[in-house]
Amino acid sequence: MFGMLKKVFGKTSEAIKEVAPEKKKAITKEEFEDILLEADVNYELVERLLEALPDTITRTQAFNSLISVFQYKADWKESDAVPYVEMIIGVNGAGKTTTISKLAYKYKNEGKGVILGAGDTFRAAAIEQLSRWADRLEIPIVATRQGHDPSAVVYDTIEAAKARGLAHVIIDTAGRLHTQTNLSEELKKMIRVAGKAMEGAPHRKMLILDGTQGSSAINQAKAFDEMIGIDGIIITKLDGTAKGGSVLSIADELQMPIFYIGTGEQPEDLIRFKANEYVNTILDEIFL
C-alpha cells in the first residue's frame, strides 16, 4: 500500500523536493508552509494548520496537524442491502467510466456478482465506452441508445440484478455541466426511480473528482451535493499531477468520506483511501 501511494504521489514528491531538497529531523514553520503550498494545499487551510504549530516542527507535530484535517464525522451509514446499488456522478473528463470499471473489477475479484447500467444516455460515446469495459471484464451491462430515458436504464439494471441474484449494481450518470437545471432534474428522477425499483436505493452516491482540478473540483462537489446529496468521493488522476496536497483541501472543504483513490488507467488501479497512510507518504519526503 505504501509503495503504491509513493508511486501515485511521485510528482507531488518531486515538487516537495524542489522546495525541501534535504530531509531533516525538524523543519521551520516557513519551510512547512512552502512545502504545503507547493503541493497545492489551499492557502487558508495552510494558515490554519500552521497556527497551532511551533516555529520548529517535528514529524510527529506535522503528522498531528495534517491528520486533524480528516477528523470530521461524515454522515454516512453503510448498507448490507443486496443488490447494493451505487450511482456514480461527476463531470465529463473526471474519470467516471474508468472508475466504474475499477469498482466492477474489484467486486468481481472479491467473488461478487456485478452489473453495470449505462445511465449516461446523453453521450453515445459514454455508452460505447462503458460497454467496452463490460465486455473486457466479462460483466453484464444494461445499455440503450443515445437519447433514451436514463431512469429506465436505472430501473432495468436493478431489476436485472434482482432477477439474477447479483450483489452489486453500478450506474453511470450524465456528466455535462453541473450548473444545468435539466441535469439536476434528470439525476433526481434517476434517484427516485432507483427507490421504486428497490427500497433504499441508491445506497451510495459516489462523486468522482479529478485531483488535478483543485478548487474547481471542490466547487463541482458542492454543486452536486446541493442537487442530490453526495455520500462520498473517489479522487482520480493524482498519479499525473504534483497537486497531491489537494486531497487535504478536498477533505477540509467537503467533510465527506474519501473512499478510494484512482492510481492509473487499468482496472486494478484503485486503492482504498486511508488518511494516516496518505499523510505519512507526504511526510516521508520531508523528514528523516
Image (spheres, rainbow, N blue to C red):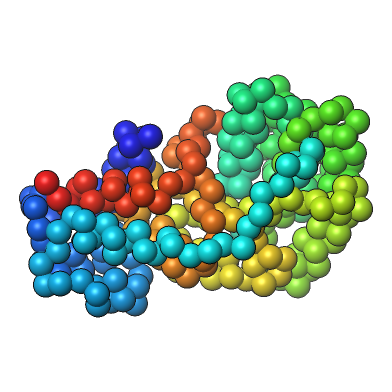
Where residue 110 appears, as percent x and y from the top left, is: 62, 25
Q: Nearer the viewer, residue 267 or 166?
A: 166
Q: Nearer the viewer, residue 116 or 287?
A: 287
Say if 141 sits above or below 72 in the image: above
Say if 287 sits above or below 67 in the image: above
Say if 140 sits above or below 63 in the image: above
Image quadrant of residue 135? top right
One can see residue 215 in this view: yes
Where residue 78 appears, as percent x and y from the top left, is: 66, 49
Image quadrant of residue 214? bottom left
Q: Nearer the viewer, residue 97 or 122?
A: 97
Q: Residue at x 62, y 71 (%)?
A: 223
Quarter of the image that includes the N terminus? top left
One can see residue 224 in this view: no
Left or right position of 195 against 286: right
Left or right position of 86 against 95: right
Where residue 12 appears, as percent x and y from the top left, is: 28, 51
Q: Residue at x 87, y 34 (%)?
A: 162
Please give the count of numbered marks on the rendered protein: 0
Where residue 6 appears, as percent x and y from the top left, is: 30, 40
